[in-house]
Amino acid sequence: MTDSDLTRRRALALGGAAASAVLGLGTSACSSRHRHAPDAHKAPDAELCVLNPSVTQGPYHLADAPFRKDITEGKEGVPLTVRLTVRDQPHACALLKDAAVEIWQCDAWGYHSGFPHVPPGGSAPAESHVSGIAPMTYLRGFQTTGADGVAEFTTIFPGWYTGRAPHLHVRVHTGGKKTAGTYKGGRVNWTGQLFLPDSDADAVYAKAPYTRHTGTRTRLAHDPVYRGGGARDGLMTVTGDAGTGLVATLTVGIDSTREDPGAGGSPASPLPGSASADGSPPPDSAASASRTPTSDLTPRSPDPSAPAVPRTP
């Protein structure tokens, strides 16, 4: 029996979308079948590759994020270590070295760097910046994967904003190089969102500074981007506790031979820096992002004299 026959038999056993991944019919991710917390630096067997399509980049991406492991810049919140293992699906799901992993997220109150006047919804304090926090770069960064395929970041557990469950945004790039403290060139091979379990969010949001943002947050079952497929759809395995810090891990598979900027976005697309007409945050799902007008979409640094944007009730 050939390797191709074995691959097809595994695909049929997995069924549906997973079969498409094993047969190479789309962007994929590799994730473990096992429910217990994995060794974050040990990627699963290649045969466990399953389909994990790219999703929207969302409205808060900014180019030229700095290369660094610690992206907090002094932002307060429950410590979170993010460990992402990257595998190359069309090359036997081999561990991928020197891929550039880019992440960005909101702070504990739901604000993103570069978008200080976009309200997170509910009732939250106004965005504030203290010494050492750069208003355009906090909670954004690049890291390259090592020989083990792992890129690791030090950050905080993200807050929430209207309509979305807690998540981080991620892109995997290849073919470029580190230039002037950031990553340039190459291609975007995968655009995803990393989700965190509701139970961990419940524990985190009961602590300061998260408690200063009140309102009704969206849970995973109602998030417009999360598809409910667990690790296949970006749900991370989380260990630790909200008192001392959490570690979130996931293994993803990319196709290093293909450009895939994600639904509703491209590497050079302009992105919004202002609230919607009704004062709500910009759309963050693939369908709504495609309807976002391209006028008045320039992110901006905080302006103390600028009028406050009304927050969503």
Image (cartoon, rainbow, N blue to C red):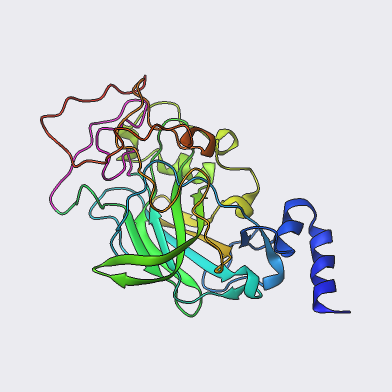
Counting from the top left corner in percent of width and height, residue 244 is at 38, 56
Residue 166 visible within the image? yes
Residue in the foreground of this view, choosing between 230 and 198: 230
Which residue is found at the position 31% from the left and 23% from the top? 311
Counting from the top left corner in percent of width and height, residue 1 is at 89, 79
Q: Is residue 196 left or right of residue 34?
A: left
Residue 68 visible within the image? no
Q: Is 6 located above or below residue 195 in the figure?
A: below
Q: Is residue 40 left or right of residue 27?
A: left
Q: Is residue 130 one of those drawn in magenta?
A: yes
Which residue is found at the position 53% from the left and 41% from the top? 198
Q: Is 71 located above or below residue 115 in the figure?
A: below
Counting from the top left corner in percent of width and height, residue 252 is at 57, 62
Q: Is 42 located above or below residue 292 in the figure?
A: below
Identify the image quadrant of residue 123.
Answer: top left
Counting from the top left corner in percent of width and height, residue 30 is at 63, 64
Q: Which residues are magenta?
A: 107-131
